[in-house]
Image (cartoon, rainbow, N blue to C red):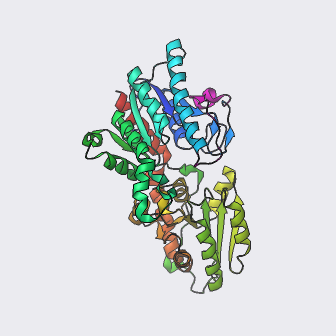
Amino acid sequence: MSRFDPPPHPLSIWIVNPFDDIPGEALPPLRFWTLCRVLAGRGHEVIWWSSTWSHRRKAVRKNPVGVVANEGFSVRLVPVRPYAKNVSWSRFRSHRDFGRALERMALEGVASGQLERPDIILSSLPPLEGPEAAAKLAHRMDSQFVVDLMDLWPETFDRLIPGPRWLRPFLSRFFLGGMQRRRREIIRSADAISSATQTYADTVLNDMAPEDPAAREKPLHVCYLGAYLQEFLPPPRLPPADEIPSEPVAQKPLVCVYSGTLELSQDVDTAIAAAKRLSAAGTPAEIHIAGTGRMEASLRAAASSVTGSCRVIIHGLLHRSAYVELLSRCDVGLVLVKPESLVAVPYKACDFAAAGLALVNSLPGELAGLIDHYGAGVPYTCGDAASLASALTGLADNRRLLNDCRQASRRMAEAVFDREKTYPALAQWLEQLAH
């Protein structure tokens, strides 16, 4: 069966994720909207269990109107309390609300006949409470339970633990040990594991060994967050070397973009310092920063102090059409993420590759390996403005290298980030689990 063949018969599938934007909130669809859409398009009855609180917008959300007719799947909102900060006791209490109310609503719906017993329940991790409730429901309803690893949770909180470096491992076990034990129990109860990166899967499964080596025998499927390649035109190509005019031509500024959250987990302030170095060296460049967060005001103030040959433009949060148009004018995508955030392959890297941008990347590990394999960009050292400025200067001064990186970046997107290929493959893997 190819990834585009229809399944043998329709399934009832529940998707549990409270974080992603739901239909009517933003475009394009992120991971779970995309998956629901693909599964529904393959003839399955799909319910997405989300929450009444939008994690991204920090606002109350309502059931989308006409979602079944427009998308082919339904959305059910689980009531939770609001929270203002991503790291707060209010957030953890909200997640507890989600797990408890999800279990109650699902059992009542099936018992009353309003809902069909699911063949598969796929739940994202984080949070812990969603897959914990999903595991209980799957056990009671004889459903396949799949946990989808979206982040390293709770390891992502390690960087927030105070105290001297030598003391942090002990404090981490004290504060986060209970969460790790809960995650191990979720993995034990899962029939299969999907993951947004190989890094997340390896880390979680290594945490199970040697106590539970059987965890590595569970079916595993890696599907990157990905991007819609049809949003972007392929990057332009340089003419062959023998067709380039012999007379020197003034180079256009190197146009770079960062997009995403403007929080302390990102290395965006290093881009400001690098811009000042580029101006001091007379390198023509533009650095565009799109997104919002607690650092936005300080970044705007810092950007106004950059003068000379390099400009820094702060856009704030852009509508999707404006975001796509911005990327289409750029040469370089800046993956300015601190390695201690433990992010492996972020959304922004997928979008940048889809747009055919050369990637300048701070993350080691999986993303760096992909970039090296395809020749899609160059690294820099996080927090080091001289390193970032040097990477950008190298691309500005060598347009042939820039062109090669851009073409390779698009090839990388076509190979591993194309949602038109990767999400049907994930859907087919889920179908095989059920059959």
Instruction: Pick the residue in front: 57 or 166.
Output: 166
Magenta region includes residue 277: no
Quarter of the rendering containing residue 211: top left
Q: Is residue 358 left or right of residue 330?
A: left
Position in image of residue 335 (x %, y %): 53, 63
User: Hey, which residue is sitting farthest top in the picture?
Assistant: 112
Q: In this rendering, is residue 17 above or below 169?
A: above
Residue 369 relative to residue 264: left or right: left
Classify residue 417 as left or right of residue 188: right
Q: Residue at x 60, y 66 (%)?
A: 268
Q: Main secondary structure of the magenta part?
A: loop
Looking at the rendered image, the quarter that the C terminus falls into is top left
Write down the region rendered in magenta. 64-88
x then y, percent, for residue 284: 65, 79
Res 281 quadrant in image: bottom right
Counting from the top left corner in percent of width and height, residue 80 is at: 61, 33
